[in-house]
Image: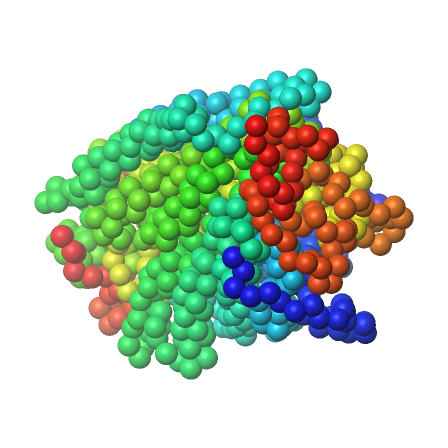
Amino acid sequence: MKRTLKFVALMLTLSTGLASASEKMSLWQRMQPPEDIGTYGHLIHYLFNFTTYLNIFFFGLVCIGIFGFSFLYSAKRHKKPLYTHGKNKKEILTVVGIALAVFIIIDMQITRISAHDYQTVFMNFPKGKDVYKVEVMAQQWMWNVRLPGKDDVFNTLDDIVTNNDFHVPVNKKVVFQIISKDVIHALYIPNIRMKVDATPGKITRMWAEFTKPGIYEIACAEICGTHHYKMRARLVVHDAEDFVKWQESAQAIALTVNNPEEPDNFWGWQWKE
Amino acid sequence: MAFFEQHIHPAPKTFLSKYVFSFDHKVIGKQFLWYGIFFLGVGGMMALLIRWTLAFPGEAFPVLGPLLFPDNGGVVPPDTYAMLFTMHGTIMIFYAITPILIGAFGNFCIPLMIGARDMVFPTLNMLSFWLAVLSAVLLLAGLVTPLGAAAGGWTSYPTLSTLIGSPGVGQTLWALALFVVGISSIMGAINYITTVIVLRAPGMGYFDMPLTVWGLWLTAILNAIFLPVLGAGLLLLIFDRVFGTTFFLAGAAATSGTGDPILFQHVFWIFGHPEVYILILPAWGIVSDLLSFFARKPAFGAKSTALSMTAITILSTVVYGHHMYTTSMSPLLTQTFMALTMTISIPSAIFFANWLGTIWKGSIRFSTPMLFSLGVVFVFGLGGLTGLYLATVTVDFYLHDTYFVVGHFHYTMAASVLLGGFAGTYFWMPKMFGKMMNEFWGKVHFWITMVGLNGLFTGMMVVGYAGMHRRLYNPFVYDFLHKLIPINMFVTVCAIIMGASQIIFVINFVHAVFFKKENATQNPWEVGTLEWTIPSPAPSHNFDVIPVVKCGPHELGNPNLTSGRDFQYQTEELVKA
């Protein structure tokens, strides 16, 4: 009985639409992705919206067909069906025309846009001294993060190693090199609309540039076992001044904490340019 | 064109030979139908448990929860949750949709529609069903092993599915079960392919076959080619688990040499992408036929529909890489797969235009099978178009492994296939069991299902676009997903509505099969394909005399007809002016 009541109460909260209670939001606001703080999120949104408009147009045509024809040609309204096999020239040309229109208007356009973005932005990895480098090792169920420290070389004593805690400077190109210790995970940063798999035995890469300081979330997007849902990390984007402060204190801590006798501390690898 | 005429065997007399170990394709079809409906119920119940957990994390599942999870106060525990979505996917694909669409309709319709007395290999056919039963036992046995059934997702990517991630014997049983069900499906597939080639009635060319048979035949071809690929992958996985090989092992635990976990993904998706077409092709075929039958006019461009389904069958084998964009494949490969994937929309658009052309200027009768067929056109339109987002690599970087993907593939694989299956069940019911299902409750079933289904799967896409990723026991540990709680509740309510409406179907079905008094007439829908030239239900040897085919399957609404009917049987010479 108590359970039934509880269920009814839950349904009621739902029907009033105030289930999360804390803040009032319109449905439209709830449907939006988290704030875009990267430099290439707008490319993804542009392509998404472009596809959406065209989809609405073509699905509108399908709906006009389904509902319009159902209305106009129901047995009550339209007693004598047209006897055609769809084989005459006009009918064939119409069908071919529709197929080509779909392919040329949607498919070729979105393929072109996506391939262009993919080559010039997503796969165009920043190189050189100015790049902020991060090594990531995923494991069940935690993110290990390694920064090269002041010598700019990985796997040395001055490396800054954190767990479930990513610190990056604002407006600087960041490259992540990612590997997994056990099963496949995926580094997912919703705020920049990007994810890449963390695979055991293979280093994968992803780059980003964060444009707004603040604290955000990082998730694991690939099923990795029972506690997959808890594999959450914090992403701190520092402004320039703040970042120097954080780096200095973290560096000082790292130098005292890192134990040269402990092989587990040296899971990093030589940076792959 | 039959290569030979099958003998008429005396009808079986004993209960065992008639209903259990039957060689009759119609009985085997019905066995698959019951089997599929049973698992549809099991998989659906699992779906409700999953949805409940997502909408009300930490709340006890009403009624069933305390019975199933007494140690956890009726709340689904996280490890069980992983088991649930794994088994839900596996059961729905291999134990519900495959048996209903391919096992039941394939077995029942192919010989009847091409004018044969049975499948060409009846023993193989019976074995195929009983292997499927064995496989179901193996799969369900996983549930009672100490660490529970498989919990690595239905894709079971290594190294999660190796001993590193899943030490329990349940995962091994899962792989074995799928291997066995694969053998069962291959047996069926070989049977279907051969039957269609050698047993078509005299006079029936390939393009005189109903499109249902086309869909089932193409499905069988894909099954025969690609299930062995899955079998190979699963066997290697079993080797890794049982014999200590390292085909798919890598990382810290791969102490005795390393393999490549990504290799499994390639093998899996070479099978896995054709698999989605394996599931949908029979539904496409059924819908193409039913639209014509109930619009009372010939199928628009039937030949081009058959050819575009063939084109999709071929293209489906070269696009699988779009499941793996985030694995960092070579950029050249990634872009090639993207371009190849896009070409699938040409044949898809052709048969979509043909479907709409079929109902254009028809004289549409809105019987239950027709409503479900129109439903398929609607939901597959949505499912197909949302695939475009995921096919473009850059958008996929954001949407990959989010609920957007879940919504998309449920629209194509669950919604379309389920509605197509219902359309077929309502349509062939008189020929299968000699009874009609109730039209009124059929329509109620359709409308409630449509409301629930669209709320459910559109809702999934909405939360996916907002960033919610898949397979989360409790999504709301993430702050950015907090605002999605009400939408998730809405989705769950829609799931409950959709689940509840299936009770109407089950009652309607069971009532028609066991309790209904009045028998169906020989040809209640007034269509001309071969199965309607014989009594309802079909006699055990189908055709007393093998029919001779003289015209196509969709000859309806011919103005030159003088017989008083508005259709003609395939055994009649085409009436010309």
Q: Nearer the viewer, residue B62 or A238?
A: B62
Residue B162 appears at what percent x and percent y?
43, 70
Residue furthest toward the bottom?
Answer: B243
Residue B261 figure quarter: bottom left
* Image point (60%, 65%), residue name: B5
Q: Quadrant of the C terminus of chain B?
A: top right
Q: Is residue B552 above or below residue B4?
A: above
Residue B61's spot in the image, x, y percent?
A: 71, 50
Residue A53, located in which quarter of the rendered image?
A: top left
Q: Is residue B437 left or right of residue B169?
A: right
Q: Is residue A79 visible?
A: yes
On screen, residue B451 above or below A4: above
Front-lying residue, B458 or B183: B183
The residue drawn where x is 33% and y is 64% is B263
Q: Is residue A4 above or below residue B37?
A: above
Q: Horizontally, is B164 left or right of A154 in the view?
A: right
Residue B226 in percent (x, y) is at: 42, 61
Q: Nearer the viewer, residue A137 or B142?
A: B142
The residue positioned farthest toward the front in the image shown: B577
Q: Is residue A261 above or below residue A190?
A: below
Quadrant of the image occupied by residue A107: top left
Residue B158 position, x and y percent, is: 40, 65
